[in-house]
Amino acid sequence: MIYDKYPAVSGRGDCVTGWEAIGGKLRATGARVIVIESYTGVRQQDLAELVRAIGPDLAVDAADALKASVEIDTMVYPDVTDDPVFGRITQMSIKDFFELRALDRLRSDTFAARGTVVVYGTGASLIAQGDLLVYADMPRWEGTLRQRSGETSNLGAKNLEERPALKYKRAYFVDWRVLDQMKQSLYERMDFVLDTTDRSQPKMIEGTQLRESLNATATRPFRVVPYFDPAPWGGEWMRRVCELSPEPPNYGWCFDCVPEENSLLIDFGGTRFETPALNLVFREPARLLGDRAYEKFGAEFPIRFDFLDTMGGGNLSMQVHPLTEYIRDKFGMQYTQDESYYLMDAGPDASVYLGVKEGIDPAGMIADLKRAEGGDFRFPDEKYVNKWPARRHDHFLIPAGTVHCSGANSMVLEISATPYIFTFKLWDWDRLGLDGRPRPVHVDHGANNIQWDRDTDWVKRELINRSEKIAEGDGWTEEKTGLHEKEPIETRRHWFTKICPHDGAGGVNVLNLVEGEEVLVESPDRAFDPFIVHYAETFIVPAAAGPYSIRPHGPGEGKTCGTIKASIR
């Protein structure tokens, strides 16, 4: 079975590789002042290599104008907080991290210098507009891995040794927000863009190449680059189906469509350039999302598909997601994580915990959760929470405020809105995280959001397998499967043995091939090239792609195939 772990879109032109060639190309432009702006996660050593390859008469490091790290720590504290998981989305900008007098001094040095000047590092564009702007970008996932390994700190911080989870939290609530705001202001000015994710082969393309590639991608089906991560409850299904490395202890997560952190690979004549998929969301939001979703969510990708693998593993944490008003008031997010579990596969004993039992005492459940938090008391889940049998292709709907978790021996395709960090763990089954520490739980937050009327009868009636056939044609049927009316996402399942028509109706579609080995996505008016999808692969069809069809292809021909599709209502 094929699962493409490195999907790419096509780009035009050449890609320059290696520091010497990159430096030579920049020197050849004849620019006197070269500004190299950078995203968090780009290594200082890589920027130093590029400066060396350019060989300027003066090199100006933007870090020399940063405020003292202690001052920055104090400044960001209201957004970072003491909580081990949650903070508040910052309203700061990149200028807040710099000393104004120091910036003025570096500006004067740059202006007065003779010969070639390179201004480099995060915040370099505050010092000089320059004759040439080079942007060193970094996908969030790669940046997270570098934080874990102790290679990089947070913006303006000296915290290489801090726990990775705390560095990630600070990046989520502060660094990414500040630097995304700055990056969006620079897109049209970028003369060149750097890819330093592969430290052995740095790459550079022209800014026009990036912009043209993003423009073209917003008109055709594509996939982002998935990434996989172990978890305390992780399983073995993805290792087998996706042909993953045997080294990690398990694979719990696959982020198969989370453009905020996934990468987009662009193929330039056989050389693949890696750029954050978020660049596409920022650069082409209307054509990617469609007017309706863009008006509702802004330049944010609102649909997330990811895998939760517990096949041979354990239960996910018992959890609940915040209500919209709560996430807005407490954390500064504008929408919450409504979601669903679609069962890609399931063992004979697979289950999903969903909703509270009828007639329970809410105060008693919260008290028992708090007792269990101490570690010397097992939370009696069977007393309070429904446990439903789960089978392949079952669909469980989980609007925010509903107690839930996937049980062991399940392969879940999680379909949800995007703010994925906002999970209030209620109980974690008396186990430790992969770092050997107890994972944080948030019973008080959970208690403020649990909807106690979502009990056994309500869940059975409203949230489990609400499939309804709504259309059919020659060789295909369409079913409405949810999500719940309380949620902004609609899902449809299609079974087909022949050509199955689809219409995005002016909005973005996200799909996964949940049955069948291979299908072909085509445009009836040839607006884009045919696109091949394999089993378990998630793909995006932008609003601008227009109507499309999907049919069995290659080893999938002559067999029944199935897709699950999500769109914004």
Image (tube, helix red, strand yellow):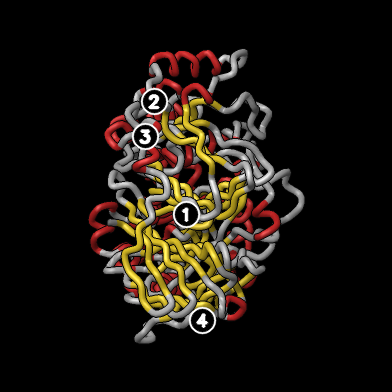
In which quadrant is the C terminus drawn? bottom left
Which of these two is toward me, 401 or 155?
Answer: 401
In which quadrant is the N terminus drawn? bottom right
From the image, tell me which residue sits under label 2: 358
Q: Which mark's residue is nearer the viewer, 1 or 4?
A: 1
Query: Which residue is painted at 43% across and 80% down in the image?
Result: 499
**Which of the marked residues, 1 or 2, is nearer the chain's N terminus?**
1
Q: Amino acid at mark 3?
A: Asp
Q: Amino acid at mark 1?
A: Phe
Which of these two is toward me, 254 or 282?
Answer: 254
Q: Which mark's residue is nearer the viewer, 4 or 2?
A: 2
**Which of the marked residues, 3 or 1, is nearer the chain's N terminus?**
1
Which of these two is toward me, 293 or 64?
Answer: 293
Q: Kindly report the distance in space between the C-alpha atoms of the residues bearing marks 4 and 2.
A: 63 Å
From the image, tell me which residue sits under label 3: 457
Q: Cβ–Cβ below 8 Å for labels 2 and 3?
A: yes
Secondary element at tag 1: strand
Query: Which residue is painted at 51% across and 72% down in the image?
Result: 205
Query: Which residue is painted at 55% across and 53% down in the image?
Result: 392
- Across and down, in percent, residue 172 comes to 45, 41
**Which of the marked residues, 4 or 3, is nearer the chain's N terminus?**
4
Q: Amino acid at mark 2?
A: Glu
Which of these two is toward me, 200 or 411?
Answer: 411
Secondary element at tag 2: loop
Q: Callout 3: few (<14), some (14-19), or many (20+) C-alpha neighbours within 10 Å?
A: some
**Which of the marked residues, 4 or 2, is nearer the chain's N terminus?**
4
